[in-house]
Image (tube, rainbow, N blue to C red):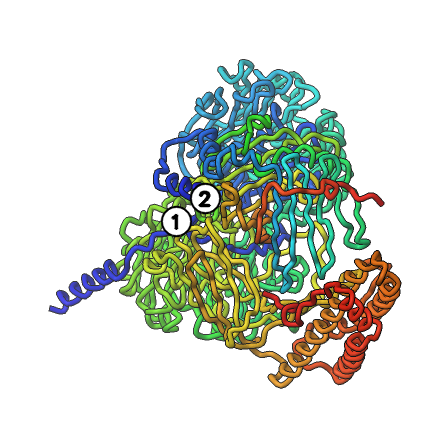
Amino acid sequence: MKKIGNILNICLLFLSYSFSQDTVKINSKEFFGDYKARQIGPALMSGRVTDIEGHPNNNKTIYIGSAGGGVWKSMDGGMNFFSVFDQYNQSIGCVSIDPNDPDNSIWVGTGECWTRNSVSIGDGIYHSEDGGKNWKKMGLELSERISSIQIHPKNKNIIYVGVLGALWGDSENRGVYQTKDGGKTWDKILYIDEKTGCSELVIDKNNPDILYCTFWEFRRTAWSFSSGGSNSAIYKSIDGGKTWNKIHQGLPSGKIGRMALALSPSNSSILYAVVEAEKNELKGLYKSEDAGLNWKQINSNFELTVRPFYFSRIVVDPKNNDIVAKAGLFGSISRDGGKTFKNFGSMHSDIHDIWFDVSDSEKMIFATDGGVYRSNNSGANNERVENLPLSQFYHVSTDLSSPYNVYGGLQDNGSWVGPSDSPGGIEAGDWVSVGYGDGFRVYPNLNNSDLIYSEMQSGEGIWRYDKKNKTIKNIKPFPEKEEVKLRFNWNTSLCTSPNKPDRIYIGSQFLFMSDDQGNNWKKISPDLTSNNPLKMNQSESGGLSADNSGAENHCTIFTVAESPLDEQWIWTGTDDGMVHLTKNGGKEWINISKNFPGLPSNTWCAHIEASSFDKKVAYAVFDGHTQNNKNAYVYKTIDAGETWKNIASKEIESFARCIQEDFQNPNLLFLGTEIGLYISFDGGLSWAKFTNGFPSASVHYIDLQKNTNDLVCATHGRGLIILDDISFMREVNNKTVNEPMYFFNKAHFYINEESNFGGTSTENQFVGENSNKNALIYYYLSKRHSIGKMTMEIFDEKGQFVCELTPGKQKGINVVEWNFFKKAPISAIGKTFDGASMQAPKVSAGKYRIVLNKGKEIFEKWIDVDYPKNSVFTLEERKQKEESVNECVRMIESLAYLVYQIDELEKHVNNQKSNPKLKKQAIELSLKLANIKSNLVITKGDNYVGQGEKQLREKLSDIYSTINAYSGAPGAYQIQNLKDLDEILQKEILSFKENKSVQTYLNNCTKSNITLPKIKTFEEFVNKK
Amino acid sequence: MKKMLTLFCLSIFSFTFSQTAEEIIRKYVEVSGGINKVNNIKNFHSSAKVEQMGMTIPVDIYTTSEGKMLIKVVVQGMEFVQMAFDGKESWGTNFMTMKPEKSSSEESENMKRNSKDFMSPLFNYKEKGYQIEKMSDETVEGVSCFKLKVSKGTLLDNSAEVQNIDYFYIDKENYLLILQESEITSGEMKGKMEQSVFSDYQEINGVLFPFSMTSRIKDVGGQTIQFDKIETNITLDEKMFSFPEQ
């Protein structure tokens, strides 16, 4: 009976699960409108750049392709770069400029070919016919990695493409492809087998029928790498790719690995090849002086032979075939045809490509793991490009500070903490280094954010850094006596507890827990992996060149999630597809690995998210790409892992890595995938890709900041990207998206009173965008407003007009910002600007009514405006400030009205200078008026250093701007200054009113039947609406 | 009113079949008022305002079919010329001295090369010698749009000839122009796209004019200019376009 009851319960649970929600399907491009993500970089460590391509005859135009950050273009010789490929696959194999139309025709092959463990996957070849402004996909969708694109120098329709292909499995989609119709159709013209791809393809620009290519046999698994085989080779064609011949005379026999290949641009007979051979002594640089007929080994230095899978690029100076540059750990250059090399000067290690300036080859550009470097002296001294935010984060976390800080580690670029907001924007100098090596997971201690936990690759270092006291303790757990070696993943599963601030977890094959900040550890699990010895031979990894960096460590715990609702409930997922749950703090573990329907065995469990609503609810994301499987696997359980349902829908076009559940609306989910961020408003029934300000970059981790509701995404190639305050998304449902107009609920705003002196960045440095501190009014329009007027106004509680705003009119989400300003005072007209009075006063705390006039329809919303939380100013101080500001405004506008009357009178007087009856008087009065005015406003000089002496207007504006700019009470000396100026002002007003010359003139005008000047009332004059 | 009716009819009967760039422009011109009415306009004056940091800044814009242009701005009662072009020379007021200064000869030459764009580069594009090309549809302002590329010859950048191309995004439902963009071809922002977003269309003498225009660099917040009044074929003192005698 109990069993029947259980079955019934499960059925009922699934029924409620299936029918509790409606699908909320949205079209992302038509929905998100003004709501945009902000990219905060940083760029100070940048990220891996894979390829450089320069314009053949304009050294100002340079393109770079990056590992995970798309394509960037410089039009100033490499000083500044801007992204031109945001909407497309961000993993770039190569960029190629068409020599037939180099200003416009650009080809991009996606899929990075420097095949490290964390490399992403491309999705074909793209073409731009306008220098990168617009792109069209031109096929080869299954190519995964494109190593080279060579365009016939006399026929733009003939293009050869080297496809390296799949890394994680067999594929027939590799080899050399050719199109003769500009990319409409492709023929595979050289294919070896499903394991061997084209790693380099070169065309002889002097005779484009001649082509050379290298083929490479290679393979990765999650636990191994193999470079080399009997099918790797160099081929040559002399008939435009119709036939190919292996050209190995003089090259080593046996298995061959990855090879670099370059043809001298200035001498078509000279070729350089860097060969990964079976025997160490036969590895290195080979040269041919007869167009590939014969090869001779000339050098086998470390820099030539190091890590061929990562550095197989050799480049020849465009004018001198003896100058050869080789990518490498540090990179090196030869000036004697390869006989000897010297290393380049200091720059980030791991150099992947090198470009010689076409007009001065001492000027060079380098693609490294740390971005792009420029050199003016052949690489001896190098300067980093500081505006390439290509940082490759593995993870992100946030603290509870205000503004909160973001923490994360980067591929080959350490671990960092930086602010989510900073004066002048988030600058390079705002970031603090908190870890060496490859950086991964970084967490603050939420009770004491001076304590930071960070780590480097394979858990070689796991640190507790005391930022305040400047101490670093390595807290890595060690094996117990007689215990097997601990296996830590490359990206070791470090995390903190949501329940106990001093608790941290570290996963090897066992789960370790510390309740005292890592001082002591308790092993709370058995081996939770498959513990498969066949997957633990990392020392054999690499193929022809040993490569045991820890990147292939396997059978390890990869994700740990303690339930926010019960510290005893802990979920673990491993890189070999095992999922466990303990309900009693690790005493017993339940293996739930078999409960995922449709999931191939041993699929990498990339992330488990324990729900904030119910401890039996959790999400598990599996990433199958290391098994050559690019499907998205996103599972949800509502019964403590007994059953799971895949909630990935067909809208998700690539594999997924991580998920974040909202804290308030369980149907609101965020999914990080290899090609960007997806959002679901219906608990996973449907997903929409978020693209506003969010490139198609790989999202490795997501954190939802608890105080601000900011969604912080760690991308692996475009740095950190923040979706500020996602709270409006909680209201997205079928009712709201079907309203013609819908104001979102957020209605409480805090006046931004922060002030500072700005940042320190220079012109060419990347600065991350700060969050918007204004009141942001969100509404949804089901149709764009195109015809007729649409306005937005703000009124106070008494119905007084405050200001006008510019409403958004697009279909979808509109975000109108109000900076809390009222209208600026009307200032007296002088000869120069009165900058100080241009600033408007801010409103007081209170209720305000937003009125949206859309044609004949009127929509209203009340909002609350409040002073900042934790403000240092009392209400009494604010009252004093507001009264003084109001007094200033009254005085500025009274003076403006006085000057207006003088100006109007002067115009009138000037018109009477030709009237014989009034001429004399008019001339005299004109001089007197000018004299009066000269004491009221500046009437001469310019707006810079030639400015005249400050007069009453400028003195009033000075005191106004001084008081207005500070939220606290004005000082007594300031109030006294105001009183003094008011006395002068009142005297001037009275003096003008009683001016006898003016009275006489006006009387004479009346007597002469001359119409008197039309003077507005003060109320008419200051009407700001 | 007739234009509104045309607009309504096009909205109701808009078809999804593939249309050529020429057909799209024909419908755009029809919705805008028809080529005769458009061609009847020889000049127009727009009175507008810009809201900025609590200040309302009045702006007056004068343009003529010959490409002459004047943009006058009033700040704190002081009037200055933000930009003017008399068909030969471009100039504006220096904010420091409040005196007029000529633009560089290259800027003037580029203004001259764009001087055929009165009202819209799409009107009479053939006579202007512009090349048009239909590109893939795109969604802008939440609306599915036809995208047209208009090649207008070249501009100068440090004496080099660079292509002068505009892109137009026309609402597929009602053939209104929603967004126009072009690449910045010189200076610090070279390579970035500048955009103008149009809305609040109203009919003036049978021709539709946008009464709201937001100018921005792509993906960066912009500045909206709101038009209060547009008057066509007014009597102009041509001198106002020319650099003032000193």
Would you call the spot at circle 1 few (<14 residues within 10 Å), some (14-19), or many (20 or more)? few
Q: Is residue A383 above or below residue A282?
A: below
Q: Which amino acid type is shown beneath numbered disc 1?
A: Asn
Q: Is residue A344 above or below residue A788?
A: above
* Image x and y of residue B181, in percent: 57, 41
The residue lying toward the viewer, choosing from A101 and B162, is B162
SS at badge 1: loop
Residue occupied by mark 2: B139
> Can the viewer see residue A577?
yes
> In which quadrant of the rendered view does residue A971 lie?
bottom right
**Left or right of residue A759, residue A1008 in this image:** right
Q: Is residue A83 above or below residue A597?
A: above
> In which quadrant of the rendered view does residue A831 lie?
bottom right
Residue occupied by mark 1: A27
Q: Is residue A852 above or below residue A995?
A: above
Q: Chain of mark 2?
A: B
Q: CA distance from mark 1 to mark 2?
A: 10 Å
Q: Which residue appears farthest toward the top when viewing the image?
A: A239
Q: Quadrant of the N terminus of chain B?
A: top left
Marks 1 and 2 close (CB-CB < 8 Å)? yes
Which residue occupies 41% across, 48% down?
A535
**Left or right of residue A955, residue B144 in this image:** left
